[in-house]
Image (spheres, rainbow, N blue to C red):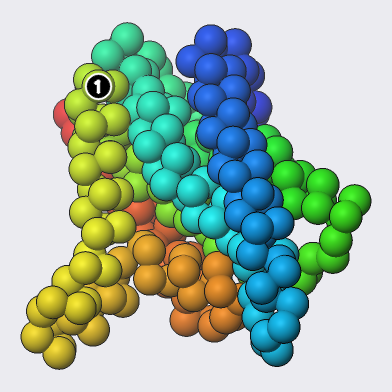
Amino acid sequence: MLSIAARELRSLFLSPLAWVILAVVQAILAYVFLIQVEVFLQWQPRLAGFPGAPGLTAIVVAPVFHTAAIVLMLVTPFLTMRLLSEERRSGTLALLLSAPVSVASIVLGKFLGVMAFLGCALILVALLPFWLLLGGSLDFGLLAAGFLGLVLLVAAFSAAGLFMSSLTAQPTIAAVSTFGLLLLLWLLDWGSTTGAQGAGELFGYLSLLTHFEALLQGIFDTRDVLYYLIFTALFLLLGIWRLDGERLAP
C-alpha cells in the first residue's frame, strides 16, 4: 500500500499539471489573504468599541479557508481523474489487479498518494495565517477547527474522485463527473432552506458545505467529523467493491 502511495505521489510531482495546480491555488489564496487583511485594517477602528466583535482569525483566516475549500473542490477532480481511469485506459490496471496485492491496498495506496500531494497544498494554506502573528494574535481554537474541516473536506473530495475514476477509462469523464458530484453535494445546503422541513434537514445533513461551515465557525461537533469520515470511507469502499468486481470478472 505504501509503495503504491509513494509511486502515485512521485507521478504527481513529475506532472507539470500538479505544479501548476499548486501555484494557482497558492496565488489565489495569497490574494484573498491580502484582501481580507485590508478588510480587517479598515474595520479594526470600528470593531474596537464592540465587545465580542469578530477578531483577526474570523475576519481573515476563515474566509481564506472557505475560499480554499472552493478552489480545492475545483482542482481535486484534475488530480483524481487519472488515478484508476488512466490505468484502465493504458492497460496497466489488469496487471495491477493480477499482482499479489489486495484491492484494498491498491485503492488505499492511490488515496494516500493523492492525499499526500494535497497535504502539501494544505500546509501552504495553513502557513498563511501565521504571518498575522507579526502584528496580531490568532484564535488557535478557531484556526485548528477550520483547518481540521479543510483536511476532512479534501479527504472527502479525494475519495469521491477516486471512486468516479474507477468507473471509466476516460480521465476527462472522471474529472467532469467528480466535479458534478461534488458540486451537487456542496449545493444541497440550498435545499435545506427551500424544501419541506424533513427534506430540508436531510439535504442540510448530506451537504458537504453545512458540516464544513460549522467547523469553520469553531463549532467542533463529532457529528460533523463523523459525517466526513463516513463519507470518505463509503466512497473508498465503493472503489474497492468496483475493482474487486473487475478482478473477479472472467
Instruction: Determine if residue 97 is in view.
Output: no
Instruction: Give the residue drawn at x 21%, y 77%.
Output: 192
Disc 1 designates what residue?
A: 172
The picture quadrant where one finds residue 220 is bottom right
The picture quadrant where one finds residue 201 is bottom left
- Percent coordinates x, y for residue 229 in the rendering: 48, 65
Label 1 element class: helix
Instruction: Give the residue drawn at x 15%, y 88%.
Output: 198
Q: Quadrant of the image for the N terminus?
A: top right
Viewer-closest of 204 and 52: 52
Q: Eyeballing the image, is 181 above or below 195?
A: above
- Percent coordinates x, y for residue 216 in the rendering: 55, 68
- Left-right relation of 34 to 48: left
Q: Quadrant of the image for the C terminus?
A: top left
Q: Eyeballing the image, is 231 above or below 246?
A: below
Q: Residue furthest left?
A: 196
- Left-right relation of 8 to 157: right
The picture quadrant where one finds residue 39 is bottom right
Instruction: Give the residue drawn at x 27%, y 14%.
Output: 89
- Left-right relation of 142 to 77: right
- Percent coordinates x, y for residue 35 in the rendering: 59, 45
Instruction: Give the residue drawn at x 82%, y 47%.
Output: 131
Viewer-closest of 11 and 92: 11
- Percent coordinates x, y for residue 91 in the rendering: 31, 12
Viewer-closest of 229 and 181: 181
Q: Disc 1 marks which amino acid?
A: Thr
